[in-house]
Amino acid sequence: MDPRSEVLLRQAELFQGSLLLTGLPADDLLGTLPNARGWSWHAGDFAALDARFGARTHFGTEPPAEAFDAAVLFLPKARDLSDYLINALASRLAGKELFLVGEKRGGIEAAARQLSPLGRARKLDSARHCQLWQVTVENPPQAVELDSLAKHFEIDVNGEPLKIVSLPGVFSHGRLDRGSALLLENIANLPTGHLLDFGCGAGVLGAAVKRRNPGMQVTLLDVDAFATASSRLTLAANGLEGEVITGDGIDAAPKHLDSILTNPPFHTGVHTDYAATETLLRKARDHLKKGGEMRLVANSFLRYQPIIEQHLGVCAVLAEGQGFRIYRAKRG
């Protein structure tokens, strides 16, 4: 059981009514709270919850339509995403209870201050290195449309501006990160055909490749619904076509790819997590055609090269700078 769930269950009597668990972990919490429903935007967590609890789970960037007596928000890492989620919940909870739970090192005490405009917030519990806060929503805010919170910026592709649209919670929200910038400098001479942008975020890499190579088939894949929603907005803003998939890792990707381009994540919430990237490196050959190529940017301290060579083929460092390396490998 996730420590945050354990803290909730220490106050289980508060959560017996109609309850929405927002951003909940993929554990047995729903099984212990029979009147609760879960809302997730992480495809992996949702798949695990859906397999066990079926219709009691909801997936997407918007909350489910039905009304609830109370809601719990499991604090996400990104402050801008917290702002959106608190608004989305509190705007529907006039006179009702909103709870916030999270790890101390994840900034739960600072996040609890975001509750103060809604009413008097109070700390209910502190255990398992987590805290649980409660507020009665006396001042419900006006609901804010998610798309209105998008940040827009432009990058240069072949001398022309490419519009990027990112939503709250998406990696490098509102700006181009250094790793992707280095990778964009090294996307020439990719194999023609079908390209996968793995861990697409706001769709920077996939959209840039499609702009440079209009005839290329491009698929963008991410585990996070806010990321894939951003990628769809980015493609639309530039009049580009591409398939966008919200799925849990490389297993959700098409087969027979000509190339994989990726700036893969190595954090889940506040925790370091290399699992998705290491699974990609182990299974990339199953999704690439013979002679297909993978290009990956990673922090220089991450020892991915031996894993790539073990599972895919000879791996070369294509470029290096600002603490990042670009790896290139072809399937033999």
Image (tube, grey):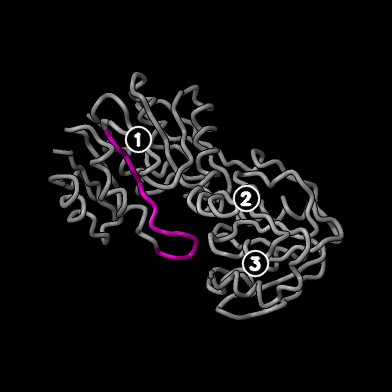
Residues at marks 1 and 2 touching, judged by CB atoms closer than 8 Å = no
> Is 64 placed above or below 156 here?
below
Q: Nearer the viewer, mark 3 or mark 2?
A: 3
> Residue 117 in the image: x percent, y percent?
79, 62
**SS class of the residue under badge 3?**
helix
Q: Taking 2 as reference, is 241 above or below it? A: above
The magenta segment: 259-272
Chain-order first, disc 1 or disc 2: 2
Please provide percent x and percent y for residue 313. 15, 45
Which residue: 70% across, 41% down? 145
Disc number for residue 32: 3
Pointer 1: what residue?
196
Badge 1 element? strand
Q: Please state if 127 lies on the left or on the right of 284 as rendered.
A: right
- Indicate the position of residue 264 as horizontal and vertical percent values: 36, 49
Q: In terms of secondary structure, where does tag 2 sit?
A: strand
Residue with the mark numbered 2: 57
Instruction: Give the amino acid at mark 2.
Output: Thr
Seen from the viewer's position, the closer of residues 84 and 254 is 254
**Residue 276 in the figure: left or right of residue 132:** left
Disc 1 or disc 2, which is closer to the eye?
2
